[in-house]
Image (cartoon, rainbow, N blue to C red):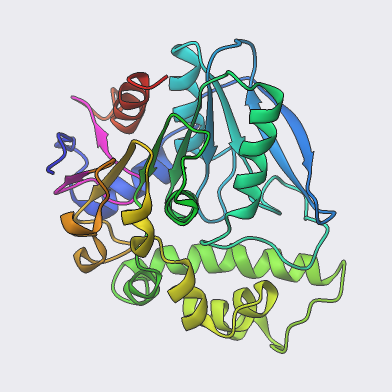
C-alpha cells in the first residue's frame, strides 16, 4: 500500500533524503548503558540500553557498519524512551567499537545472534512484551529470521525499514551512478575493519590486497563468503535475501520503504502476493534510504520514521 510520508520541500530527491539523515543530522542525545552478551560459540555482542524504565522492550538492529551512534538508531531509541518503553541496540559482531573474538563477523543473513538475544530476554522476563525494529541490513536479517522461523516467535510486532530485499539487486545498484558514493564509503569502512582484525588474528582469506576490492560483490566474494561458510557471493546473496521469506512471517510486521531508495531498484520491492497476511508494506514514492526527512524548514526538520515506527508498535505493546 502507499505510505503517507511526504518529503520536505527543502530536501528533495533520494540522495538529499539519504545524506541529510546520515550526515547533516546530529545524533540525538540519549543516555545508554552497555551490556556484553556472551555467545555460545565463545564470541560476544554488545547491547546498548536506554537508561531507566521497566516497560516493553524494543530491539533495534542497525544497518551495515552502523551502531548505537548512528543517528537513525539514536532517533528511534529516543522515540521509544518517550513512550516509556525500553530500547536496546543489538550491535552485530565487531560493530560496537571493539573487534569481536572470532574470524567471522556479521552479514545480511546473520540471524543466530538475534535469535539468541530474543531467547535470552524471554528467559529473563517471560511476560515482558518484546518488539524489534531493523534498518537496512538489520531489517533484512530480522525479516529472514521471522520468515524462516515460521512458527510463532516471542515478539509482539516488528518493523523493517529500507530493506535490501534482494541482495543481488542491491550489490548491482550500488555500482552505478551517484550510488557508488555510498558503496565507496561503506567499503572503505569494511576494508578497514578487516585490515584491523587481520593484525590481531589469522583470517582464512585468499585475497592478498584488500584495496583491490572495489565493489560489494568483490568484498562478498573474497571476504564475506569465505568467513561465513558460503560458496561464493552468489550463494550468500541467494541464501540471505529476505524477500523469499516474507510469506512465512506470522508476526504483525510493518515494512517501510521508498520507491526511490538509491541502494536498490524498484524491482527488488516485493509484490503483494509475496507477503503473508500479517505483513503490511507501506511504500512511499520518496524517502531515500533510511531517510524520510520532513518538516517545514531546514532548521526544523522532522524524522518521520520516529513517528511512524512507535505509532505502529503501540498497537501491540
Question: Residue extending furthest front?
Answer: 151
Position of the N terminus by quadrant: top left
157 left or right of 112? left
Position of the C terminus by quadrant: top left
Q: Specify the segment rendered in magenta.
A: 281-296
* 34 inside magenta stretch: no
Q: Can residue 215 be seen in this view?
A: no
In this orientation, which residue lies closer to the viewer: 20 or 126? 126
User: In the rendered image of this protein, does residue 75 appear above or below residue 174?
Assistant: above
In this orientation, which residue lies closer to the viewer: 214 or 308? 308
Q: Main secondary structure of the magenta part?
A: loop
**Where is residue 160 shown, x and y percent of the image?**
38, 44
In this orientation, which residue lies closer to the viewer: 264 or 238? 238
Residue found 78% across the figure and 55% down from its top: 100
Residue found 66% across the figure and 72% down from its top: 228
**Where is residue 267 shown, x and y percent of the image?**
21, 68
74 left or right of 278? right
39 left or right of 162? right
In this orientation, which residue lies closer to the viewer: 315 or 170? 315
User: In the rendered image of this protein, does residue 66 appear above or below residue 58?
Assistant: below
Q: Is residue 83 visible?
A: yes
The total number of labels drawn is 0
**Where is residue 71 shown, x and y percent of the image?**
48, 36
Residue found 64% across the figure and 70% down from its top: 191
Residue found 58% across the figure and 18% down from its top: 127
**Where is residue 251 shown, x and y percent of the image?**
38, 39
User: In the rendered image of this protein, does residue 207 appear above or below residue 74?
Assistant: below
Amino acid at each position: 500500500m502507499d505510505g503517507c510520508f511526504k518529503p520536505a520541500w527543502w530536501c528533495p530527491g533520494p540522495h538529499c533524503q539519504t545524506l541529510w539523515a546520515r550526515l547533516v543530522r546530529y545524533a540525538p542525545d540519549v543516555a545508554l548503558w552497555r551490556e556484553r552478551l556472551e555467545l555460545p560459540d565463545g564470541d560476544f555482542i554488545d547491547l546498548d540500553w536506554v537508561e531507566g524504565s521497566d516497560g516493553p522492550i524494543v530491539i533495534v538492529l542497525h544497518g551495515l557498519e552502523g551502531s548505537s551512534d548512528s543517528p537513525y538508531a539514536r532517533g528511534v531509541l529516543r522515540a521509544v524512551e518517550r513512550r516509556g518503553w525500553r530500547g536496546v541496540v543489538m550491535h552485530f559482531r565487531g560493530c560496537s567499537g571493539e573487534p569481536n573474538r572470532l574470524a567471522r563477523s556479521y552479514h545480511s543473513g546473520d540471524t543466530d545472534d538475534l535469535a539468541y538475544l530474543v531467547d535470552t530476554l524471554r528467559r529473563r522476563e517471560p511476560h515482558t512484551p518484546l518488539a524489534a525494529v531493523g534498518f537496512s541490513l538489520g531489517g533484512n536479517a530480522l525479516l529472514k529470521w521471522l520468515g524462516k522461523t515460521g512458527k510463532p516467535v516471542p515478539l509482539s510486532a516488528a518493523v523493517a525499514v529500507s530493506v535490501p530485499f534482494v541482495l543481488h539487486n542491491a550489490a548491482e545498484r550500488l555500482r552505478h551512478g551517484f550510488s557508488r558514493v555510498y558503496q565507496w564509503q561503506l567499503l572503505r569502512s569494511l576494508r578497514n575493519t578487516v585490515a584491523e582484525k587481520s593484525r590481531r588474528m589469522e583470517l582464512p582469506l585468499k585475497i592478498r590486497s584488500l584495496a583491490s576490492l572495489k565493489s560489494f560483490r568483490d568484498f562478498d566474494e573474497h571476504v564475506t563468503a569465505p568467513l561465513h561458510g558460503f560458496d561464493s557471493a552468489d550463494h550468500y546473496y541467494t541464501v540471505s535475501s529476505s524477500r523469499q521469506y516474507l510469506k512465512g512471517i506470522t508476526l504483525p510486521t510493518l515494512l517501510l520503504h521508498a520507491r526511490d531508495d538509491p541502494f536498490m531498484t524498484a524491482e527488488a520491492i516485493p509484490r503483494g502476493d509475496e507477503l503473508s497476511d500479517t505483513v503490511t508494506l507501506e511504500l512511499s514514492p520518496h524517502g531515500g534510504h533510511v531517510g524520510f526527512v520532513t518538516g517545514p524548514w531546514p532548521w526544523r526538520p522532522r524524522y518521520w520514521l520516529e513517528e511512524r515506527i512507535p505509532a505502529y508498535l503501540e498497537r501491540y505493546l
